[in-house]
Image (cartoon, rainbow, N blue to C red):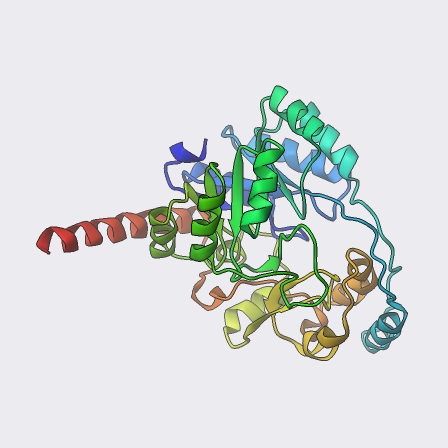
Amino acid sequence: MFHTLAVPVIAAPMAGGPSTPELVAAVNEAGGFGFLAAGYITVEQLAEKITRTSELTSKPFGVNLFVPGTRPTADISSYVQQVRSYAEKVGTAPGEPRWDDDNYAAKLELVLALRVPVVSFTFGLPDVDDVHRLKAAGSTIVVTVTTPNEARQAQQIGADVVCVQGSDAGGHRGTFADDGISPGGGELYGTLAAIRLVQNAVDLPVIATGGLVTGADVAAVLAAGAVAAQLGTAFLGCPEAGTNAAQREALAERTRRTALTRAFSGRPARGLVNRFMVEQGPHAPAAYPNVHHLTRPVRASGEVEVMSLWAGTTYPIATAEPAGAIVERIGAELSETINSLAERFRRG
């Protein structure tokens, strides 16, 4: 499926608002491929989004599910108190630091029933039986991986494709297990290095993601062996995206650095640095999704210094164009890069 895209660009699933049916449809109609994000919404909301996307585009699209992890054991009582002080400053109360599975089972049954063409998984692996059921329903299975070992596990359970996430990626790291110590929850690889290491470990098609914004970026990962490039940050400024207004403004300023943090969710994620990240990041426990629920009311305040402003390292070169225009531009830049390289070697 991904080998035949007119433009080998995939709109990443971005939970929390940015991924919309309109964004998916616009990318699809321009020759790329779009994903809906199932994370943090109800089963009913996901069903509505799938239905709406099907109305907007006749082309296949994907849905991404968060695989639930084990209940965290870290003591977060002191962190609750720290977040409470921030909540008071923005006129709200902290949320309940609870564990849940994001209605994973019900969402899985939904994508099965609706025969979604591509189903991707992040934060872990689906059960082998569920993989068989999805394939029987006609779905292609994609698993997000960050290391060669995770890719081997994905191949063992029957994944059709692996989405290899480099350390430059914005938003949550797709690591299967957070070590609770290192900034990224485990060993970090740049996108190109990750592609090469994974290809050496498994015999599966690779989608590359992490810090990819331009056609030259796409050319680089294709040359490294990927079948397509998955872009998230590149689409955050699109009018079709559901990106929060305060985040749009922060992205447009292009002045903040990015960093990995557990401050907002209890799981490593890359975003624009703000006061909450600086002050609370060093104290944040590895306790996802408990910390996510704890900080959610604070983040929803709209105050930029306490929001999770997810973005990849290359966000300053992203543009705020319509999604279709971005896909078309990247396609043109990709062709230009390939032709330029070919001409260089012909002259050489």
Residue at left offset 60%, top offset 46%: 150
* Residue 89 in the image: above or below residue 246: below
Q: Where residue 14 sits in the image (x, y, percent)?
A: 61, 51
- In this rendered view, identify the residue nearer to me: 116 or 244: 116
Query: Furthest-left residue in view?
Result: 347
- In this rendered view, identify the residue nearer to me: 69 or 257: 69
Residue at left offset 48%, top offset 60%: 190
- Image quarter of residue 117: top right
Query: Furthest-top residue in view?
Result: 136
Residue at left offset 68%, top offset 78%: 278
Q: Where residue 119 sits in the image (x, y, percent)?
A: 61, 34
Does residue 337 appear to the left or right of 125 in the view shown? Answer: left
- In this rendered view, identify the residue nearer to me: 95 or 282: 282
Does residue 19 appear to the left or right of 344 in the view shown? Answer: right
Q: Where residue 94 sits in the image (x, y, percent)?
A: 86, 66
In this rendering, the count of numbered labels is: 0
Q: Where residue 114 sits in the image (x, y, percent)?
A: 66, 25
- Image quarter of residue 24: top right
Residue at left offset 70%, top offset 67%: 181
The N terminus - image quarter: top left
* Residue 181 in the image: above or below residue 55: below
* Residue 165 in the image: above or below residue 2: below
